[in-house]
């Protein structure tokens, strides 16, 4: 069967391929003394707190399961608006908030609304793999700009200016970022926004991990900077609701009816049960629980990152948010693969991909190799997800130590 050129352009999502192998090894290791430790999955190990679960059950029992407005439940949009004011001190009117089926749908809608065939979108390398595909599905082209540790693995105004060409439509950022957990400094963002605005472009920023920010210098929403910035967010990460498929985007007033119309056709609405449940995320007891969990994520980072550094898996920039550690495994690869005949030809210099498989097989430790996140330097890096218990993090470090001894 002939598939579309669009479908053929889509690249594999390697993390999903790794997950399949991890699953197979995990089945073999189940019940053994060394069951698999998962540090490859980018989702919180917590589930929705009790009030949210109860609200979902109530919505189902009371039959509040019909379609909602495409823009989302008005009271949910109001609560998200109030959360911006309370948590980030920024006024975001509910009329500019559109509730979606996760940040994924929000990113898809934004790309469809703003990108024409041949338009180019600048984004840092490394960055979240799906973004390139969203741009491609809108017939645009993602232009990956290698970003360095000195730039916190983010774009800089100077690089945006240099890379801006005749077909450039705008920039796509994520702060804090997946895979690095590092944020863009608000001053640099302001400089980027000035470059973009001067050229009549668009700034899309994914703030899905902003709730899980650990450093006051970075925990500012880009929405404080300019009403024209498009911000994507989600209930998946800070609110611990990945499988509930609920997110939102904030757009300038002029874009609201455009996005609404596309959303009506594509999705009708986000899950009504999830929306009713999400109202309870903003109850004081739920917010207190989310803050307790944020502190737990920070404690894990504080323990785990120095441990990696001590093992020579250097994390060049300490993550200021999210639950990832982006570690340089090149020294560890040299050590692990030295003298191994299958790897001694230059054609097969082993990198993070081989390292990740080796860890899975020998240490029953699943991590994500850099390959998914870009091209520039990603064979050097692996991503650890610290969304796991302290006990599991300790086990992971013990196993890494044994493999690298
Ligand atoms: C940066 C980033 N954006 C978007 C998503 C998708 O999130 P959602 O579950 O809200 O669709 C993810 C998921 O890992 C992510 O890391």
Image (cartoon, rainbow, N blue to C red):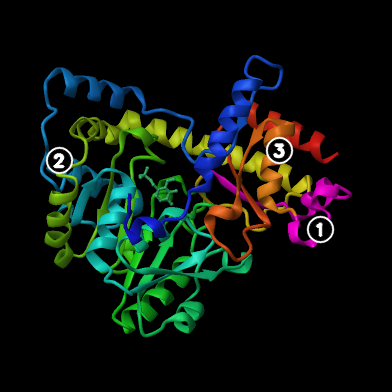
The stretch of residues the image draws in magenta is 323-349
Q: Position of residue 124 (x, y in %)?
A: 50, 66
**Crowding near the residue tagged with mark 3, few <14, some 14–19, many ≥20 C-alpha atoms within 10 Å:** some
Q: Earlier in the sequence, mark 3 or mark 2?
A: 2
Residue at 15% across, 48% down: 71
**Crowding near the residue tagged with mark 2, few <14, some 14–19, many ≥20 C-alpha atoms within 10 Å:** few
Determine the CA span between mark 1 and mark 2: 62 Å
Queried whether the magenta region covers residue 254, the answer comes back as no
Q: Position of residue 111 (x, y in %)?
A: 29, 62
Q: Quadrant of residue 391?
A: top right
> Which residue is disc 3 drawn over?
359
> Which residue is disc 1 drawn over?
345
Dot 3 beta carbon under 8 Å from ligand 1: no
Queried whether the magenta region covers residue 328, the answer comes back as yes
Q: Is residue 332 visible?
A: yes
Q: Earlier in the sequence, mark 1 or mark 2?
A: 2
Left or right, 229 with reference to 98: right
> Which residue is disc 2 drawn over?
75
Residue at 48% across, 50% down: 12
Which disc, if any, is residue 183? none
């Amino acid at each position: 069967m002939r598939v579309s050129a669009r479908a053929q352009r889509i690249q594999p999502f390697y993390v999903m391929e790794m997950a399949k192998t991890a699953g197979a090894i995990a089945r073999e290791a189940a019940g053994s003394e060394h069951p698999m430790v998962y540090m490859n999955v980018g989702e919180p190990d917590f589930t929705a707190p009790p009030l949210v679960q109860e609200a979902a059950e109530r919505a189902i029992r009371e039959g509040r399961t019909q379609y909602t407005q495409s823009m989302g439940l008005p009271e949910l949009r109001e609560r998200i608006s109030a959360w911006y004011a309370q948590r980030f001190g920024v006024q975001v009117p509910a009329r500019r908030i559109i509730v979606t089926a996760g940040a994924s749908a929000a990113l898809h809608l934004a790309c469809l609304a703003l990108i024409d065939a041949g338009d180019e979108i600048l984004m840092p390398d490394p960055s979240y793999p799906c973004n390139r595909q969203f741009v491609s599905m809108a017939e645009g082209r993602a232009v990956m700009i290698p970003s360095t540790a000195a730039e916190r693995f983010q774009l800089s105004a100077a690089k945006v200016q240099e890379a801006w060409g005749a077909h450039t439509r705008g920039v796509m950022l994520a702060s804090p970022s997946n895979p690095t957990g590092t944020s863009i400094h608000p001053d640099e963002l302001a400089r980027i926004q000035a470059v973009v605005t001067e050229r009549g472009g668009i700034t899309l920023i994914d703030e899905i991990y902003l709730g899980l920010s650990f450093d006051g210098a970075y925990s500012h929403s880009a929405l404080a900077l300019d009403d024209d910035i498009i911000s994507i967010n989600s209930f998946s990460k800070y609110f611990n609701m990945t499988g509930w498929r609920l997110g939102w985007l904030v757009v300038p007033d002029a874009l609201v009816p455009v996005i609404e119309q596309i959303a009506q056709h594509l999705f009708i609405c986000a899950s009504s049960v999830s929306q009713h449940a999400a109202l309870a995320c903003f109850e004081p007891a739920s917010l207190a629980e989310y803050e307790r969990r944020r502190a737990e994520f920070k404690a894990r980072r504080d323990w785990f990152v120095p441990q990696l550094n001590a093992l020579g898996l250097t994390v060049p920039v300490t993550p200021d948010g999210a639950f990832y550690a982006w570690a340089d495994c090149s020294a560890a690869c040299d050590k692990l693969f030295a003298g191994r005949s299958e790897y001694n030809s230059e054609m097969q210099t082993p990198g993070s991909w081989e390292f990740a498989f080796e860890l899975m097989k020998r240490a029953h430790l699943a991590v994500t190799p850099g390959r998914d996140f870009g091209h520039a330097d990603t064979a050097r890096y692996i991503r650890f997800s610290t969304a796991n218990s302290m006990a599991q993090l300790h086990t992971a470090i013990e196993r890494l130590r044994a493999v690298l001894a």
